[in-house]
Image: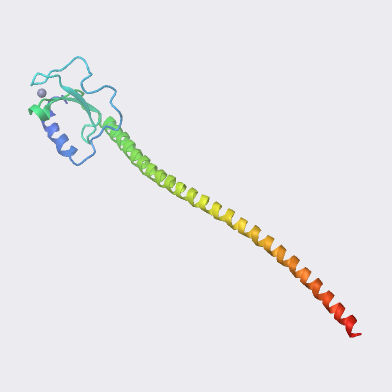
Amino acid sequence: MASSSGSSHNRGSFWSAGRNVDSSSPIPYRERPLDYTPAVMCKCGAKAAMFTSWSDLHPGMRYLKCARARVVGCDFWLWVDPPHSQFVKQLLLDLRDAVRSLRQEKGALQCQLQDAERSNVALQGAFADAERSNAALQGALADARRENATIQAAYVEARRENADVDGRRDVQSL
Ligand SMILES: [Zn+2]
């Protein structure tokens, strides 16, 4: 199958499919769209930009299109690579989908990590408050123990005085 024969039909499919589907590249481009050589000039006279399709129909196929298409309304379009075999096409789609799902999982895990970090900060604050309360309570307990010891000493003293008074009363009554 020649790469040019289906290009105009494929282009329509690419854009109609691309509107609601994630068409972002699962991997970073090795070179920017205008860095390739030799240059291919498009209908409007500018160097055409080279992109890689990640659509369901043409995964991993490079294509050239006008870099200023939206500005000048130039509809230049050319596939660079011939279609892949069904095996390679499916392999690329599976790899694309694996990268995307791993990215989603990573994003969800990063959100969970941020939540956990926020909870950790809140718990550390509550723990510091609890430690401060505990220190204050320990201080109050030490004060109360000292007061208790003073009261016990006064009680022992009062009992001794009371015993002395009782002793004198017994001697007088004899
Ligand atoms: Zn152009």
Q: Is residue 98 left or right of residue 7?
A: right
Q: Quadrant of the N terminus?
A: top left
Is 35 rendered above or below residue 115?
above
Please provide percent x and percent y for residue 72: 8, 27
Outermost residue, top direction?
38
Is 154 rendered above or below residue 107?
below
Q: Nearer the viewer, residue 174 or 62?
A: 174
Outermost residue, bottom direction?
173
Q: Quadrant of the C terminus?
A: bottom right
Q: Hey, which quadrant is residue 17 in on the image?
A: top left
How many marks are shown on the rendered structure? 0
Whether residue 6 appears in this view of the structure is no
Whether residue 8 appears in this view of the structure is yes
Please provide percent x and percent y for residue 153: 75, 65
Q: Nearer the viewer, residue 130 or 121?
A: 130
Is 25 rendered above or below residue 33?
below
Q: Quadrant of ligand 1?
A: top left
Q: Nearer the viewer, residue 14 or 30?
A: 30
Outermost residue, front direction?
172
* Residue at 10%, 25% in the rendered image: 76
Q: Is residue 160 left or right of residue 130?
A: right
Q: Give the colouring mode of the picture.
A: rainbow
Q: Is residue 121 left or right of residue 108?
A: right
Please provide percent x and percent y for residue 6: 13, 29
* Residue at 77%, 71% in the rendered image: 158
* Residue at 71%, 63% in the rendered image: 150
Q: Hey, which quadrant is residue 3 in on the image?
A: top left
* Residue at 24%, 38% in the rendered image: 22
